[in-house]
Amino acid sequence: MTDDTHDLLMQKVMDYLKASEEFETRPSKNTSRTARRELRELMRLAKTRQDEIMAHYNEVLEGFRKDQKWQGRRKHPLI
């Protein structure tokens, strides 16, 4: 089963919280590496999700422009 980026991001948040808690209770080189690795993965997934959201927004906006639906949302027709 493949998860979408949002689900992976939420799972990685939980993994990071676990690693961070372990680092706080038992600071060591190994636990700090694990926490930092989880953070790097979290940042990578966040960037991927950001790109997905922007692409989806652009698709919706393009659809509104093609269908002229955005015209009804304007306060003044000439603005």
Image (spheres, rainbow, N blue to C red):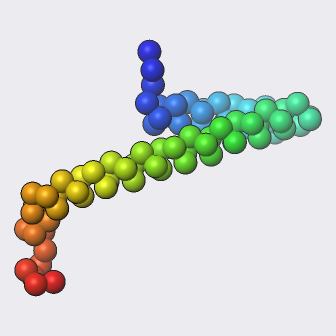
The spot of residue 24 in percent (x, y) is 81, 39
Is residue 29 rendered to the left or right of residue 46? right
Q: Residue at x 9, y 63 (%)?
A: 68
Quarter of the figure with residue 29: top right
Q: Residue furthest front?
A: 66
Total number of numbered labels? Answer: 0
The spot of residue 32 in percent (x, y) is 84, 38
Quarter of the figure with residue 34: top right
Q: Can residue 40 be seen in the rendering of this structure? A: yes
Question: Does residue 67 sit above or below 17 in this rendering?
Answer: below
Q: Residue at x 59, y 37 (%)?
A: 13
Front one among 44 and 42: 44
Q: Residue at x 7, y 80 (%)?
A: 77
Q: Residue at x 51, y 43 (%)?
A: 48
Front one among 62 and 27: 62
Which quadrant, please, contains the N terminus?
Answer: top left
Is residue 56 rendered to the left or right of residue 39? left
Question: Does residue 27 sit above or below 77 in this rendering?
Answer: above
Which quadrant, please, contains the C terminus?
Answer: bottom left
Is residue 26 rendered to the left or right of residue 59? right
Q: Can residue 26 be seen in the rendering of this structure? A: no
The spot of residue 78 in percent (x, y) is 10, 84
Q: Residue furthest right?
A: 29
Front one among 10 and 77: 77
